[in-house]
Amino acid sequence: MSNDDSKNFDARRIREELGIIDTEPLLGRRRKDLVRHNSVQAGLPEDWTRATFIVRVSLLEKLKDFAYTERISIKDALDSALELFLQDVDDLLRHNRNIPRENERLQIGGEKTYDVKEVAAILNRTPITIYKYIHNGKMNATRIGNNFFITESNLIDFAKNNNLVISN
Protein backbone atom coordinates (compact mmCIF):
# COMPACT_ATOMS: atom_id res chain seq x y z
CA MET A 1 0.00 0.00 0.00
CA SER A 2 1.51 3.35 -0.95
CA ASN A 3 1.67 6.33 1.36
CA ASP A 4 -1.16 8.04 -0.55
CA ASP A 5 -3.43 5.02 -0.02
CA SER A 6 -2.66 4.83 3.68
CA LYS A 7 -3.69 8.51 3.97
CA ASN A 8 -7.08 7.61 2.42
CA PHE A 9 -7.64 4.70 4.81
CA ASP A 10 -10.03 5.70 7.62
CA ALA A 11 -10.24 3.03 10.31
CA ARG A 12 -12.93 4.88 12.28
CA ARG A 13 -15.20 5.09 9.19
CA ILE A 14 -14.74 1.40 8.38
CA ARG A 15 -15.31 0.45 12.04
CA GLU A 16 -18.61 2.37 11.92
CA GLU A 17 -19.58 0.81 8.56
CA LEU A 18 -19.00 -2.67 9.97
CA GLY A 19 -20.79 -1.77 13.19
CA ILE A 20 -17.84 -2.70 15.42
CA ILE A 21 -17.83 -1.07 18.83
CA ASP A 22 -14.84 -1.73 21.09
CA THR A 23 -15.92 -2.49 24.64
CA GLU A 24 -12.38 -2.60 26.04
CA PRO A 25 -10.94 0.73 27.15
CA LEU A 26 -7.64 1.70 25.62
CA LEU A 27 -4.84 0.96 28.02
CA GLY A 28 -1.75 2.98 28.78
CA ARG A 29 -0.55 5.58 26.33
CA ARG A 30 -2.29 4.16 23.25
CA ARG A 31 -4.91 6.89 23.26
CA LYS A 32 -5.09 8.47 19.82
CA ASP A 33 -6.81 11.63 21.02
CA LEU A 34 -3.73 12.89 22.85
CA VAL A 35 -2.02 15.69 20.95
CA ARG A 36 1.72 15.61 21.29
CA HIS A 37 3.83 18.59 20.39
CA ASN A 38 7.33 18.14 19.06
CA SER A 39 9.57 21.18 19.40
CA VAL A 40 11.60 20.01 16.40
CA GLN A 41 8.51 20.54 14.23
CA ALA A 42 7.87 24.07 15.50
CA GLY A 43 7.33 26.53 12.67
CA LEU A 44 7.07 23.88 9.94
CA PRO A 45 4.03 23.01 7.85
CA GLU A 46 2.22 19.85 8.95
CA ASP A 47 3.63 17.60 6.21
CA TRP A 48 7.26 18.69 6.68
CA THR A 49 9.93 17.55 9.14
CA ARG A 50 13.51 18.41 9.95
CA ALA A 51 16.13 15.81 9.07
CA THR A 52 19.90 15.53 9.20
CA PHE A 53 21.71 13.88 6.32
CA ILE A 54 25.29 13.03 5.54
CA VAL A 55 25.99 13.87 1.93
CA ARG A 56 29.03 14.05 -0.35
CA VAL A 57 30.49 17.54 -0.65
CA SER A 58 30.35 17.44 -4.47
CA LEU A 59 26.60 16.68 -4.44
CA LEU A 60 25.92 19.40 -1.88
CA GLU A 61 27.78 21.90 -4.04
CA LYS A 62 25.66 20.91 -7.06
CA LEU A 63 22.52 21.31 -4.97
CA LYS A 64 23.65 24.76 -3.80
CA ASP A 65 24.44 25.77 -7.40
CA PHE A 66 21.01 24.59 -8.53
CA ALA A 67 19.29 26.49 -5.70
CA TYR A 68 21.25 29.66 -6.47
CA THR A 69 20.58 29.44 -10.22
CA GLU A 70 16.85 28.84 -9.70
CA ARG A 71 16.67 31.50 -6.96
CA ILE A 72 15.14 29.06 -4.47
CA SER A 73 16.17 27.87 -1.03
CA ILE A 74 18.31 24.76 -0.60
CA LYS A 75 15.32 23.19 1.18
CA ASP A 76 13.14 23.72 -1.92
CA ALA A 77 15.92 22.55 -4.23
CA LEU A 78 16.36 19.34 -2.25
CA ASP A 79 12.59 18.83 -2.11
CA SER A 80 12.19 19.17 -5.90
CA ALA A 81 15.24 16.96 -6.58
CA LEU A 82 13.95 14.21 -4.29
CA GLU A 83 10.44 14.55 -5.72
CA LEU A 84 11.78 14.10 -9.25
CA PHE A 85 13.97 11.17 -8.27
CA LEU A 86 11.28 9.34 -6.31
CA GLN A 87 8.51 10.01 -8.84
CA ASP A 88 8.91 6.68 -10.64
CA VAL A 89 10.70 4.75 -7.91
CA ASP A 90 7.61 4.15 -5.73
CA ASP A 91 6.63 0.94 -7.52
CA LEU A 92 10.22 -0.31 -7.44
CA LEU A 93 10.44 -0.20 -3.66
CA ARG A 94 10.35 -3.70 -2.22
CA HIS A 95 7.61 -3.03 0.32
CA ASN A 96 5.26 -1.64 -2.36
CA ARG A 97 5.48 -4.58 -4.76
CA ASN A 98 2.46 -6.80 -5.32
CA ILE A 99 0.34 -5.02 -2.74
CA PRO A 100 -2.95 -3.79 -4.17
CA ARG A 101 -3.68 -0.07 -4.20
CA GLU A 102 -6.89 1.30 -2.64
CA ASN A 103 -8.64 1.40 -6.03
CA GLU A 104 -7.32 -2.12 -6.78
CA ARG A 105 -8.28 -3.60 -3.39
CA LEU A 106 -7.77 -7.33 -3.27
CA GLN A 107 -10.96 -9.36 -3.10
CA ILE A 108 -11.17 -12.95 -1.91
CA GLY A 109 -14.35 -14.73 -2.93
CA GLY A 110 -15.81 -11.39 -4.01
CA GLU A 111 -15.34 -9.93 -0.51
CA LYS A 112 -13.43 -6.81 0.44
CA THR A 113 -10.21 -7.55 2.32
CA TYR A 114 -8.03 -5.68 4.80
CA ASP A 115 -4.35 -6.13 5.55
CA VAL A 116 -3.00 -6.60 9.08
CA LYS A 117 -2.16 -2.91 9.52
CA GLU A 118 -5.68 -1.86 8.53
CA VAL A 119 -7.33 -4.46 10.81
CA ALA A 120 -5.12 -3.28 13.68
CA ALA A 121 -6.34 0.29 13.12
CA ILE A 122 -9.98 -0.80 12.87
CA LEU A 123 -9.82 -2.84 16.09
CA ASN A 124 -7.59 -0.40 18.01
CA ARG A 125 -4.92 -3.06 18.41
CA THR A 126 -1.29 -3.30 17.34
CA PRO A 127 -0.31 -5.23 14.20
CA ILE A 128 1.63 -7.66 16.40
CA THR A 129 -1.59 -8.44 18.31
CA ILE A 130 -3.38 -9.12 15.01
CA TYR A 131 -0.57 -11.47 13.94
CA LYS A 132 -0.95 -13.30 17.28
CA TYR A 133 -4.72 -13.64 16.69
CA ILE A 134 -4.00 -15.12 13.24
CA HIS A 135 -1.31 -17.52 14.41
CA ASN A 136 -3.40 -18.64 17.42
CA GLY A 137 -6.38 -19.34 15.15
CA LYS A 138 -8.60 -16.67 16.72
CA MET A 139 -8.80 -14.75 13.43
CA ASN A 140 -9.06 -16.30 9.97
CA ALA A 141 -6.75 -14.79 7.37
CA THR A 142 -5.48 -15.66 3.92
CA ARG A 143 -1.75 -15.53 3.34
CA ILE A 144 -0.59 -14.26 -0.03
CA GLY A 145 3.19 -14.12 -0.26
CA ASN A 146 4.39 -12.54 2.97
CA ASN A 147 1.13 -10.68 3.58
CA PHE A 148 -2.00 -11.69 5.46
CA PHE A 149 -5.42 -10.48 4.30
CA ILE A 150 -8.60 -10.65 6.39
CA THR A 151 -11.98 -10.66 4.65
CA GLU A 152 -14.77 -8.42 5.88
CA SER A 153 -16.86 -11.42 7.01
CA ASN A 154 -13.92 -12.88 8.97
CA LEU A 155 -13.42 -9.49 10.63
CA ILE A 156 -17.10 -9.32 11.63
CA ASP A 157 -16.99 -12.94 12.91
CA PHE A 158 -13.93 -12.12 15.00
CA ALA A 159 -15.67 -9.06 16.42
CA LYS A 160 -18.75 -11.11 17.34
CA ASN A 161 -16.68 -13.84 19.02
CA ASN A 162 -14.62 -11.46 21.16
CA ASN A 163 -15.14 -8.42 23.38
CA LEU A 164 -16.49 -6.34 20.52
CA VAL A 165 -20.11 -5.41 20.00
CA ILE A 166 -21.72 -5.32 16.58
CA SER A 167 -24.23 -2.46 16.41
CA ASN A 168 -26.11 -3.80 13.35
Image (cartoon, grey):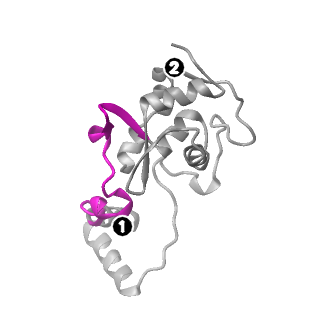
Residue furthest to the right: 28
Q: Which residue is mark 1?
A: 78
Q: Which residue is mark 2?
A: 19
To which quarter of the image does residue 84 belong?
A: bottom left
Q: Nearer the viewer, residue 79 or 19?
A: 19
Q: Give the numbered dot on residue 105.
A: none
Q: Residue at x 52, y 61 (%)?
A: 50
Q: Amino acid at mark 2?
A: Gly
Q: Residue at x 26, y 60 (%)?
A: 87
**Where residue 4 sits: x, y (%)?**
36, 46
Q: Residue at x 31, y 33 (%)?
A: 109
Q: Judge whether 168 appears above or below 12 on screen.
A: above
**Where residue 157 sits: x, y (%)?**
52, 27
**Where residue 86 sits: x, y (%)?**
30, 63
Q: How many marks?
A: 2
Q: Judge whether 53 appears above or below 92 on screen.
A: below
* Residue range (magenta): 85-114
Q: Nearer the viewer, residue 12 or 140?
A: 140
97 sits to left or right of 31: left
Report if residue 112 lies within the magenta region.
Answer: yes
Q: How packed is label 1: few (under 14 Cα within 10 Å), some, or many (20 or more)?
A: some
Q: Nearer the viewer, residue 130 or 46?
A: 130
Q: Amino acid at mark 1?
A: Leu
